[in-house]
Amino acid sequence: MSTWIDIGPLDAVPLRGARKLLTPQGCIAVFRTAEDEVFALDNACPHKGGPLAEGIVHGRSVTCPLHNWVISLETGEAGGADSGRVPTFPARVEAGRILVEADRLAARPAA
Amino acid sequence: MDRQKLIVVGAGMAAGRLLEHVTDGQPGAWEITLFNAEPRGTYDRIMLSPVLAGDKTYPEIVTHDAAWYAERGIATRFGERVTEIDRAAKTVTGTDGVPVPYDKLVLATGSSPFMIPLPGHDLDGVIAYRDLEDTERMMALGAGNRAVVIGGGLLGLEAAAGMAARGVAVTVVHLMGHLMERQLDEAAGFLLRKSLTDKGISIRCSATSKEILGENGQARALLLDDGTELPCDLLVMAVGIRPSIGLAREAGLAVGKGIHVDDQMLTSDADVLAIGECVEHRGAVFGLVAPLYDQAKVAALALAGDDAAFVQKELSTKLKVTGCDLFSAGDFSQAEGREDIVFRDPARGVYKRLVLQDDRVVGAVMYGDTADSGWFFGLIRDRTDISEMRDTLIFGPAYQGGTAVDPMAAVAALPDEAEICGCNGVCKGQIVNAIQDGAADLGAVRACTKASASCGTCTGLVEQLLAVTLGETYAAPAAQPMCGCTELTHEDVRRLIKAQELRSMPAVWQAGAWATPDGCHVCRPALNYYLLADWPLEYRDDPQSRFINERKHANIQKDGTFSVVPRMWGGITTASELRAIADAADKYNVPTVKVTGGQRIDLLGVKGEDLPAIWADLGKAGLVSGHAYSKGLRTVKTCVGTDHCRFGTQDSTGLGIKLEQALWGSWTPHKVKLAVSGCPRNCAEATCKDVGIVCVDSGYQVGVGGAAGMDLKETERLADVATEQEAIDVTVAFVQLYRENAKYLDRPYKWLSKVGLDWVRARVVDDLEERQRLLDAFALSQSVYQKDPWAEHARARAESFQPLASLHREAAE
């Protein structure tokens, strides 16, 4: 059974925007789409490590601010002619709060 | 034989339907008593809105009156509230205090409207929208009075439309960003808002109510938290309903959000059933009528001892407001692996969106044309595999195998009087007439109407009119669309925004037949710019549609850090400013401090989290944003001019500072750099800037369209003027003309190559009336946008620069 951690209110992330979440696994970008869906991805583009949390969110995609790679928020896959994949993490909204699954995120990194 | 005794509490729609089933299915089997707190029988509560709007009368919506119940041998106790249930003794007590025995009890207590506990909510003139009394209060208001409705959901909008139809001035106040956000997406919410506004209803979204103001115990206005007062004679709260569970809870039945029931509608007591809006079934509560009727049927069968189970089904919503055709069903959010099919027909104001998952339709939103809604609802409900008809699915059942969407729809939809060519004031009708009279190509249309013969930005629209009017005989030259979301070019979109007075992004998406729900990283920044440039007062800047540099007011570097460049007016600084910059560089461990080509100091490598703090520190020394990150005015570079230089002819530094103070903070299609040199030796390198002024003995030479980037280009002389004020006016007017007409991400030289210097000179230099209009338009825009964003962010939005949370602490535990 998985454990979910409350990381803050949905309102704290702008509509079509993102905020960063610091974890022992590194920095995660938490996205909110126009439809109030949330997604959690590694905050690093597979291309040159660009900070995805700073990108423009459209539909269920984000465009990396450094070189305009378009990343699917659902799968983490780069779109179009680009190839690469960003790790994704389970996230959901419950009663106006954002929850992320703790098991992978809060664990200490393997030494 | 003694008949079994059945008591029903509540005579709403669920109870009425239940008693129909019971008396039809088991005639005479039960001795039935019906309690109802409302002093009347059963009516179709859903039809209160048509009653309010005057489309129906109360007698028309009565479904089961006292006579109907009498005919079926049911004892009615209308206007009588049940005060107690004794489950041990199996009795129910009404207001007369005499216990009435039952064998089976059905609770159908319904729901009560939720009243926000705002100060003043108990004033006279504050009502909910739930029953006939509320409806009658609204009907009695009468033309010329004012009403405020809190809540932009289904019920609130029906109340608003009903009162508006009776001549009441209605304002709807809605907490969320768009209307009916639970049923509609933003695009459909926008269309709904538009048609309600057209009906004279004033709509305020993203508005938070603070207090209801009263006078002599009577509500007189609603106060919003931004200080706005909305005067009203009646205030209607329509923010939701809560299941009425008080009676059940006191009787010791299991309750949560509603009265807990199982699939047979039995509560935690097997002799007590519950149906309707008061129940909670598998975590869900119910507000629409279809499941209530299903529950009534199941409960009737359960009472008869027959097997039946209530199953929750997909629901759909329709708004009962004349002229607002909308439909929403299923789920259109929150899941992985979903895809959208979006169809927009600007000609008819139609928007349709289907949400697909695993080759099945899981959600649908429609506005403007809901004729096929039943078919789509069937696909959702039956989980039909649509992979075979996916290509034409959105066109509905009649068009399976039909043709693709017409990319010309936006232009075809324009009315004849829509202005196509702004330069020459040519309307669509004139152009179409010219084409029908034989003008068969762009050159011919230009020759006989002058349309697109000046700045040329409407060329795309004229070509589309040729295509629409001539059909297949016209071969249009290929134009580059703005992005994959639309067939329109940048120029088309700019014209449409002006011609159709489109003032929001959803409006443009609709009119331009966008194929995506909310655009992409290419079109959104461009649209945001076009809208704020054309409608500075009406449109509100959308940070989420801006590239990160303009959202965070700093330049992102390749490692994700930012650079910070304070403004130095005309390149002039002071010892105390330099000290503040040095202190900030120390305090925030800035790794690189560099002097820029535009005579500024660049602090490179600042962490995103530190931005608000470093801005606050710099702000204390009087430094503001240098906008070194913006598609806007960057720098005005100057030489020292007559102040110190032995060759200087004019005060070039002073003019540079004045220009920078006039232009800073403005958004432009691309970055804009200026320079002012004090003599033709041109130490400020003014002749390769977007606007470069070279001072001479006789005055000022204003050049435009220089470049020293990917292309290298010398400025062209726009005008020679005698006074400093004229130099400023010509410069500002030029920048405004560029703001109004250029394509996003065209520097001035690229724009000039399209429209020609003569066209610009005619407006900025020769036509003094037009120059003044440009100056006024720029001043209006600056009244909104000339603010130091650093100070604003450091003060009000610092939190948004920090991480949302950190999980490190939990991990350490």
Image (cartoon, rainbow, N blue to C red):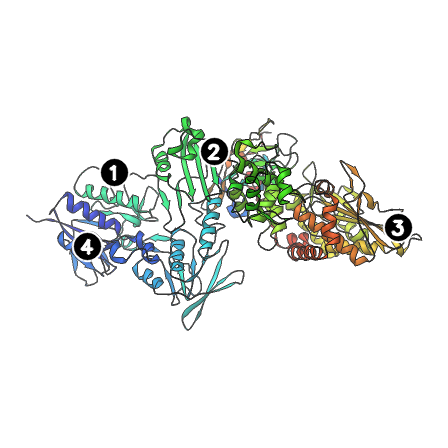
Do the residues indicated by labels 2 and 1 lie within the same chain of the protein?
Answer: yes
Secondary-structure class at tag 4:
strand
Q: Nearer the viewer, mark 2 or mark 1?
A: 2
The percent position of residue A26, horizontal first and vertical second, equals 60, 35
First reached walking from the N terminus: tag 1 or tag 4: 4
First reached walking from the N terminus: tag 3 or tag 1: 1
Q: Which residue is mark 2?
A: B339
Query: Mark 4: few, some, or many residues within 10 Å (few <14, many ≥20)?
Result: many
First reached walking from the N terminus: tag 4 or tag 3: 4
Q: Amino acid at mark 2?
A: Glu
Query: How far apart are the two marked residues, 3 and 1, measured between alpha carbons?
Result: 92 Å
User: In terms of image quadrants, where is residue B447?
Assistant: top right
Decide if residue B563 is in sight here: yes
Q: Nearer the viewer, mark 3 or mark 1?
A: 3
Q: Residue furthest bottom?
A: B216
Asked whether disc 3 touches disc 1, contact meaning CB atoms under 8 Å apart, the reply is no
Q: Which mark is residue B679?
A: 3
Q: Amino acid at mark 4?
A: Leu
